[in-house]
Amino acid sequence: QSACNKDFSCLNGFCPAFVTLEGAIPRKPTLPELNQQALPEPRRYPLDQPCNIAITGIGGTGVLTLGALIGMAAHIEGKAVILQDFSGLAQKGGAVVSHVRVSHADQPLHVPQITAGEADLLLAADTVVAASPASINLYQDGRTRAILNTRLSPVSGFVFQRDFDFREQQVLDAIRAHVHPEVVQLDFGRLAERVCGDSIAANVMLLGHACQQGLLPVGAEALLQAIALNGVAVDMNQRAFLWGRVFAEYPQQVAERLADTRQRSDVIGGDESGGTLTELMQQHETFLRAYQNQALAERYHRQVEQLLAVETRVAGSDTLTRTVARQYFRLLAYKDEYEVARLYTNGEFENYLSGQFEGNIKTTFHLAPALLAGRRLPNGRPRKRALGPWMFQAMRLLARLRFLRGTPLDPFGYQQERRQERELPGQYEQVIGLLCQHLNADNLKAARKLADYTDTIRGFGPVKTAGIEQAEKRYESALQAFLGADQA
């Protein structure tokens, strides 16, 4: 919800299943009230010389407000303050850097801009902006304390390339190399969502964290007054500020209290970043049993185990088998009409909605079923239809009929897209057979590229068709490289 720009252009995309809610009110987090008096006073900042604060972020997310709040708090305390904002041409969505300088009233400030290497504190609401050369020029190793919000925000490259590498670790390393070793790295966006129900409060939470650590030249009371004077979402922002202080003082206890226990077991693939291959296979097999039946899970298991035995003998590892397990699973568990119906009606979606929203909710499904496509859009893609909450009953029936998938009685199986999807697992099994037959220590690297050729097959309809065509081209070159390495 926090990232929605409210223009509803997402409904014009080809995603075949979308839901809108009318009358839904986001639930406010049920968290204990905080006793501010029980919280230790923030550490005092020794304002022996002017304090220079660099704030980096994205326009439109309240970054400039952070500087304004610090400035107003300094004014309330009778201190000298000067600000300069660099928002560029893209004031909303573009890079923003604020320079905030605070000193005692008897130490007037004449230059608004922080000079090179003179920043005492970095508040990085966005790490990409904080890692830019212009920003890094402000820091000094051993001097500049840094608090980083690790929540990733999409950059322009992601719009044009869905596999864009954000290089998150490299960005963080670039910042850490130029600041004080004691760096705070937290996903303040997630914390704000848990505490306030909206990630927009992350910046003020970051401010509270810095205040409690004694990194700000202004006090907590003055900052709370500044938030009140700002007059925008006062309760939420004061709550976020207080929770930021609490998290700085009791990080472990708050992390345990705010742990998100919601699990979405039906997300295809799940979290595959960790765990053993056995755990990954068990996760996939559990999903495939719910998706279709035990026979499909056993089919998956046989193919993966077959390759694992070969790779273990040849290389003593399971890296290739992991790739195959992931790609083969995706091809077996393609999302068709039956699967969309199952995911909507197995209870998790409704539980998720009831946990997120309250009120008299009316659900509308925005679907583009090929059998009911009718008149198409100018780009040739199916036109979406808005269908009411009665679709829940229709989907429950459709989900129970998934045993028809792939049989002559499957009414959806005669579509070109479904026929193509049914062929893909068999084609990939042939690749697994080739890997088992020709794998050796010399062609292991080429084998991994061959196993991953289906990675471009994603999405639905024409998007997926284009991905399949791209995968076919990748297959030819990857196969030649694999067999060539084997012969060499």
Image (cartoon, helix red, strand yellow):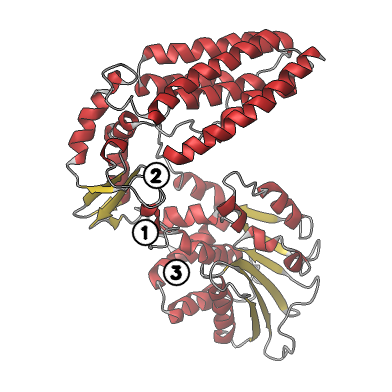
Q: Residue 348 occupies which quadrant of the picture?
A: top left
Tags 2 and 1 touching, CB below 8 Å: no
Please give the name of the residue rendered at 59% of the width and 76% of the height, measured from the top-left corner: 67
The local secondary structure at tag 2 comes to loop
| Residue 344 x, y percent position in the rendering | 29, 37
The local secondary structure at tag 1 comes to loop
Residue 469 drawn above or below residue 58: above
The disc label shown at residue 8, or none: 1
The disc label shown at residue 110, or none: none
Dividing the image into 4 quarters, which one contains the N terminus? bottom left
User: How far separated are the C-alphas under marks 1 and 3?
Assistant: 31 Å
Tags 2 and 3 touching, CB below 8 Å: no
Specify which label sits upstream in the sequence, 2 or 1. Answer: 1
The disc label shown at residue 238, or none: 3
Q: Nearer the viewer, mark 2 or mark 3?
A: 2
Type of amino acid at the residue the image marks with label 3: Gln
132 or 70: which is nearer to us? 132
152 or 464: which is nearer to us? 464
User: How far separated are the C-alphas under marks 2 and 1?
Assistant: 13 Å
| Residue 32 x, y percent position in the rendering | 37, 55
Q: Nearer the viewer, mark 1 or mark 3?
A: 1
Residue 274, can we see it?
Answer: no
Across the whole image, how many numbered discs are drawn on residues? 3
Residue 450 drawn above or below residue 258: above
Q: Residue 476 occupies which quadrant of the picture?
A: top right
Please give the name of the residue rendered at 64% of the width and 49% of the height, measured from the top-left corner: 166
Type of amino acid at the residue the image marks with label 2: Cys
Type of amino acid at the residue the image marks with label 1: Phe
User: How far separated are the C-alphas under marks 2 and 3?
Assistant: 39 Å
The disc label shown at residue 15, or none: 2
| Residue 421 x, y percent position in the rendering | 44, 26
Please give the name of the residue rendered at 47% of the width and 57% of the height, measured from the top-left corner: 192
